[in-house]
Amino acid sequence: MNRGDLPFITTRRTNDFDSLKVRLKNGLSCSKYKPIDYQQLYAITETKKLASASIQLKIKQTEQTSKISKEQRLIKQHKKVWWQEHQRLHEIRCKTESEIRNFLEENTENAFLFNFEDFELVLSEEWNKYLQNVLEPVYQLKEDLKCKSELLVDTSNPSSTENAHKMIEEVELVKKQLKTIFRRLTYEQILLEQELADSGIQALTHPSEEKIDQFHELPLELQALRCPYPDLKSAVLKEFLKFTKEYWKKLENIEQHLKAIQRNFELNEEDQWIYQTIVEQYPKDIHGRRALYLDMLQKYLPHKSRHDLVTHEKYWNQYCLTREQKKIFLSNWTKDKKDFIQKAITTIEEACTAFEMEAILAYDRKKQLELCAVLKEKVLQWRAHQEEEANLKYNIIIRRREKEKKEDKLRKEKEMLQREEEKKKIKEFWTKKEQKWQEIEKRDLQRLDHVRKIMAEQAIKDQERVKFRQELLEKRWMEKKEMAIKETKEQEEREKRLEALRKQVSIVAQVDHVRMMADTLASKARMGIGTEEEFVLQKPLFKLNTYTEPQIISDPRLRIELALREAGLHRTLYAKEILPKINPYKLPRRDMASTVFQI
């Protein structure tokens, strides 16, 4: 036990009464008590106050620097995630655009797709107008401001501050104009989204939702089965219907749980879409993922507090968990359905084989009946196993939900205690804050009156500036129009010069069909028309169309054969290989080649 933990005990002695009497007699001028130096005490307190104020200022500076560093760190992490998401979306966009182009190129004859191309041209024209009317003036203003800022830096005139104020006011005016334009564009965007929603354009449904409608339908495999025993087939179908009813009840419970969680959502459709896209944008393997997407959600949803976002996060996690459970449940149902159909097909096939054996062999009928009984027992046993497995899964899910409810209850109680303490601190803070706000409001009202007077004067100057800019734009437009007219005239003169050159080089000969179809002088001379035949004394009896002696001797094949014959080598293998490979002096025509020996 420490000394400080002991109780405070007072003791009285007889000598104390005597000392008190002496002090009362002597008064304040007693030698034991000295007078207090209040000025020294004031100086000490002032030094302490200054030291505490300096310490408090340092603490605020460190808090501010830590806050700025934290924001910069968060921005770096956000930029990294945004860049990854940008690359992924850019790849998806390029892929979809290429697919759309291929689809439009393949289906060029479709009138509906042709309207799409017209709509694309209209959108490109509107985009060009937006660039010309909105962005180009902003860039022009930026260049003007750069030039003016350089002039202000270079010169040392006293009017530089006034010019700087004018530049700032001009920039503020442009900002207001851009805000009005962006408001109009956002309003048009909302209208287009409403039109798309009214027209019935919806996203692709999840494949699990399509499977829900198939619960009450009998599969075609079971319907197409041919069983010689109708009792067995009816039992299998009843068992399948009972099996699907149990799964349907469990699915309804999951759907009701999903709807109950969805009722607790405090966000509208647009905020929910923003929440979902931001959360999905940050992958699960990032360090500090929750802090990152909560920070981003507070920036995108400023009208929602952090508490609302945390509660929505809790309900959203529950909704995603139950949805995953629903997917697992549906996958289990499809798996069990396939197993059931496979087992039913095998049982019915076994029954068919048994029936065939009964028709062939009458004395094995007892064995076939026993086999059917065994098959029925297998079906019943399998059904019992399935029911037991389903009950176990259902009990596990209920226990997990109860455990989650208990944990949520304890967490809520802790949060309530923390909120009560925070409310007290907030009340004290707001009382101080209201006093400061009243002082700031008075100063702001005085400043507002002064600013309104300045803005009224600036509006008159801005109107004059706008008129001057309009006149400049009209002047530039007229110059462009004159340049276009000049170019068209030059094009027309060029076309005229080209036409004159074409006329100089054109064909002068006239068309004469009779001359074209008539005989030529050469053909007439060959046929002897229009020429006088001279009398030849030594004229041969017959006209021979054959080769002359020089033409025959000029053939290289004949010369080589004569040389080989003179040498006595014309019957050797060497001569047989060389002679077919030697080409004539002049190759024969293609139409003279013989095809008799090619068969």
Image (cartoon, rainbow, N blue to C red):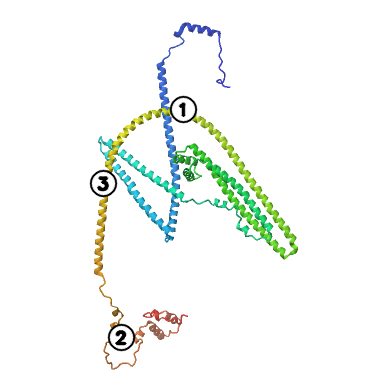
Please tell me how crowded label 2 is: few (under 14), some (14-19), or many (20+) other residues with Cα within 10 Å: few
Q: Residues within 10 Å of mark 1 (few under 14, many from 20)?
A: few
Q: Nearer the viewer, mark 2 or mark 1?
A: 1
534 vs 100, nearest the viewer: 100
Q: Residue at x 42, y 23 (%)?
A: 49
User: Whole-percent x and y of residue 32?
Assistant: 46, 10
Q: Is residue 494 above or below residue 386?
A: below
Q: Is residue 198 left or right of residue 328?
A: left
* Disc with the residue nearer the chain's start (2 vs 3): 3
Picture quadrant where residue 70 is located: top left
Do labels 2 and 1 touch, CB within 8 Å?
A: no
Dot 2 corresponds to which residue?
526
Question: What residue sits 43% from the left and 25% below the top?
Answer: 52
Q: Position of residue 557 (x, y in %)?
A: 39, 82
In the rendered image, the vertical position of residue 340 relative to residue 144, given as above or below: below
Residue under label 1: 428
Of callouts 2 and 1, the N-terminal one: 1
Q: How many marks?
A: 3
563 vs 409: above or below: below
Q: Nearer the viewer, residue 295 or 107?
A: 107
Q: Residues within 10 Å of mark 3 (few under 14, many from 20)?
A: few
The image quarter in which residue 105 lies: bottom left
Does the rendering let one see residue 30? no
The residue carrying mark 3 is 471
